[in-house]
Image: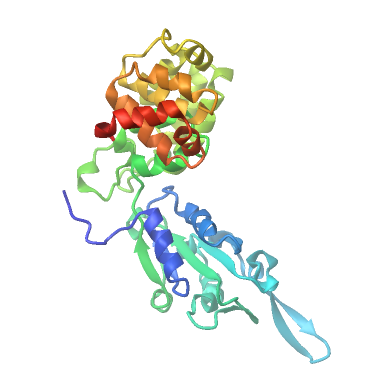
Amino acid sequence: MEINFGKTVTLKQAAAIIAATPKNRYMLRGEPGIGKSSIMAALKEKFPNHHLAYMDVPNMDLGDIAMPVIDKDSRTTKYYPNARFMFHTGEPVIVMLDEFSKGAAPVINMLHPLLEAHNPRLGDIPVHPDSIIFMTGNLATDGVGDTLKAHTLNRITPIQVSKPSFEEWSEWAMDNGIEAEILAFGKQFPQIFASYTDGSQKENPYIYNPLRPSTAYVSPRSLERASNIVKIRKQLDTDSVIAALSGTIGEAAARDMQAYLEFSDQLPTWESTIKDPRGALVPESAGACAIVVFGAISKVDKATITPFMQYLERFAPEWQAAFAINIAKSKSKQQVAFSCKAFSDWVARNEDLL
């Protein structure tokens, strides 16, 4: 196992670095679709009174940044920044310059004054001193056109952000409506979260690899889109679902995910599980068990968690532990679990599993 030695950071670590040193300008580099944009939401949690300003730099022209306006009295012109930057409010702003390294050279040059640690400005408008400005981009090895000149690099601190593991991604996914089948697939196929930068992943058929170009591959971003397809799959025929998934996450992943959809359709309904927790069918395969566990996390509430815990006790210990650990991570459901006596009793009896 290779020791990291600080070469990469997680998304959480990147957000913590930016929050701790907001006057520095960090450039977060990582593979396509790994969730770099989510750092904006993480910073908003830390700084709830800041405005948010998302800038899609490759699609910006000079006029999208600031425009010259004539002052007839002084017979001069002034730059008026675009309102989307929110600088005109005079209040602190969190600015994300997304895909900064793909921007046109004149646009990047015009944004340079924002990169200064002291007295940053946009046009003639000074930036509130408590504002936070950071950039995102891809790795140079991704081969998607990310380049910056030396005078720009000297103003910023590049940081390489790693792909999230299943554990890191699922913590977000469970609170953002990702379907149980997608979570179960990720649990059983952790290689979908591997990186092409790891030499041992050359033959991994699921992930992005610039040496093996593909129109579709698995990433946190494409898994979210796949979840939207899985959510409405019963409105479509099987061939249509697989075709849509293939175009979203690649054929290899779509074919393997098909088994999880078949598992799901054969499981007892949520209503029957809650109504008869002692008699409802308990699945035998690992994939089906994963669907039940992750599906329950999104469905349980104060009225249903006690009967579900009775049902869960009929599962193998590893799946009981998986439910307990993951619901404890869920910001939206942890209070449901911790206020349930049946859950607390289970934790007390099974501390060795946690």
* Residue at the image position 27 percent from the left and 37 percent from the top: 204
**Quadrant assignment, res 279:** top left
Give me the residue at 39% from left, 74% from top: 153
Residue in the foreground of this view, choosing between 31 and 324: 324
Figure check: 230 above or below 44: above
Q: Quadrant of the C terminus?
A: top left
Q: Residue furthest right?
A: 73
Residue 130 percent location from the top left of the image: 55, 73
Residue furthest top in the image: 279
Horizontal side of 56 relative to 286 (left or right) equals right
| Residue 324 sits in quarter | top left
Query: Is residue 310 visible to us here?
Result: yes
Farthest residue in the bottom direction? 74
Task: Residue 139: give x, y in percent of width and height.
Answer: 36, 58
Report the side of 109 relative to 26 (left or right).
Answer: right
In percent of width and height, residue 218 lies at 39, 38
Q: Is residue 15 above or below residue 186?
A: below
Q: Residue at x 26, y 32 (%)?
A: 353
